Amino acid sequence: MRPRQLLATGGIFFLIVCAVTLLRLSPTGTNLAEFQTSNRGSSGSGSSGSSNDGGGSDKSGGGGGGGKEDATKAPQSPRPPPVEGPSNSNSNSDSDNPFRPKPAPPGSHPIWHLITDAEREHEAVKARQSRTLDEAVAEYRRRYGIPPPPNFDKWYEFARAKGVQLIDEFDGVFESLTPFWGLRPATVRARAREALGFDNALLGVQVRDGRVARVAGQGPDWQREATAGMMGKFVKWLPDMDLCFNLHDEPRVVVPHDDMARLVRRAREVEMPAAGAVAQPTNAFTRPAEGLNDGSPFGETKLTRFNVFAHQPTWTHSRLSCPPESPARALEEEAQVDDVSRYGLGELGFVYNATAMSDVCYSPSLRSTFGFFDRPNAYNIVLDLFPIFSQSKISSYADILYPSPWYWYDKVPYDEAKDVPWAQKDDRLYWRGSTTGGFSRYGGWRRQHRQRLVQKLNAADNATILVNVGGSGGGGERWEPRSVPRGDYRDLVDVYFSGVGQCDPGDCDAQREFFEVRGHAGQQDAWGYRHLLDVDGNAFSGRFYAFLRSRSLVYKWAVFREWHAEWLRPWAHYVPLSLRGDDWLEAVRFFSDGKGDDDNLVAKRGEAERLANQQRDWASKVLRHEDMEVWFFRLLLEYGRVIDDDRHRIGFSRGSSSAAPEPADPPAEGP
């Protein structure tokens, strides 16, 4: 019996070995568990590789998210740079990914297509502008379905006298105020008083009897003077109102999506149709408005709905207003993939839709690549719809945009006498600035946008350019991507930090060690370069207008939105750069004289200089003090109607009565 038992035991052992082998090995002998892991690593959102903007991860603890001691140590060469980039889960090489950039048209270089389309669209917009007041009123009703606000005729005369180019293009004003139609006018007025009655870092402006009666708050003198100064030439046409101006760089109002959807639905389905049904509205604001004082100091409130938590991550709050089906609201982190198809063109993702590119709901990678979402320098927000006027904002915020007093006050002037002709400028991309954009703690600078941009443009890695492998001329050209050492184009880039700040001491030291920090550079030094880069900081960049007025070509990398979005067209008035950065080098290479590249055909036609001159000419027509005043006038007329208890009955049309209506009973309360 013993031999038989041994034989049975041996047979069982043999069967177990065979089973384990079959489960673990593929036909070629590859370990299936390892194969599955490697597949997840190559396609998952957290993998590293050549397409990762961060240039790889620092496994020794230098990457983002490490402990404090390791995170504040500067990486030592030859470790890969630790600055994080967007997930490569939407890599251009993945042909099955619906979120990858849309294909570029055949023939000419993708940038040439973008310039051609932008200029054609811009000329079409200019050609269709209203020429008379009657045309402007008709166009207003066509666009918005309601009559213009009272005193629209005064605004039109003011705009015409100031030589405004695009007299119909104010969709941004209307869209930003639409949600407020979903609240009772008295509620909007009460929330303004509530906000100004507490120390909420706001500048309060009272308009009474056609004048600025009071400016209250702790803002700098220039901001107080500029805010009131912008209103000085038209305030006599405004109704009484209390205005709340944000003193922080960062936006203040983020409303959850379901609340915002209800507000907009009520506005569009109830309130605005009621206003649109009035054939002959009254061309006057209701006086007096309930709840507004006689110009005495703002009343004090004991509580505030604003919450302060600076130097903390803000992504969770910032995405609250995004649609539930958007990538930013995906329940699993690996499903939060940038939808580059909405704004990127071709293999390198050149920006064809700047509005979609700056929509954070479609770019969840910003959570770990943009300073505002990592740790903003200031963060003081309210989750209910409050009428807060801000100079710039993130797309998911509900602040009311207005022309920045920074620009109106010429805080960054352009000195034409110090500018030089195009031929005398250095053919390089230039930028100097500090590490603003967020506050760095525990190595957070690795997840902030300015640091990522400077690191990527100066990295010792490969970059992708486009090379013409076809014939000459638009019909015969065929542009294909080619990987080249970034160092081959080192002479095209002069981008460095000039200072380090907004960081804990250890993080400041780490950045000084990691980056080559150049000395202070004067603003006028920029005019010696053909290509000027403008980048968001804590919010919008205050240098943009000075750059646009210069004789240099401007490149814009921005997520923050400003009032002028409808009046400046990407590729016609500046070169937009994408979030990911695959296009950055090729955009500069395209417009530069280069190193004698045969495929850089457009530069040989002087396209960069032509576009710079076009940009300069248009900026001189639409970014003047007068243009900002006209835009602000239109905004405050619209806001004045929104907070009027008789907003359904007031407005402008030919033959309208100019007698102020008697205050009506308030309509039923909205959501």
Image (cartoon, grey):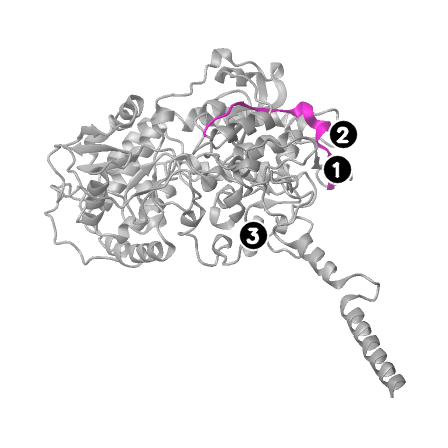
* Residue contact at pointers 1 and 2, CB within 8 angstroms: yes
Q: Residue 13 is drawn in which quadrant?
A: bottom right
Question: At which x and y percent is residue 165?
Answer: 40, 31
Q: Residue 624 is drawn in which quadrant?
A: top left
Q: Amino acid at mark 1?
A: Asn
Q: Single out the residue that lies furthest toward the top.
A: 417
Q: Cα distance, mark 1 to mark 3? A: 31 Å
Q: Which residues are magenta?
A: 477-502
- Residue 468 marker: 1
Q: Is residue 401 magenta?
A: no
Q: Secondary structure at mark 2?
A: loop
Residue topped by disc 3: 337
Q: Residue 631 is drawn in which quadrant?
A: top left
On screen, residue 126 versus residue 345, left or right, reads: left
Q: Amino acid at mark 2?
A: Asp
Relative to residue 216, is residue 637 depicted above or below?
Answer: below
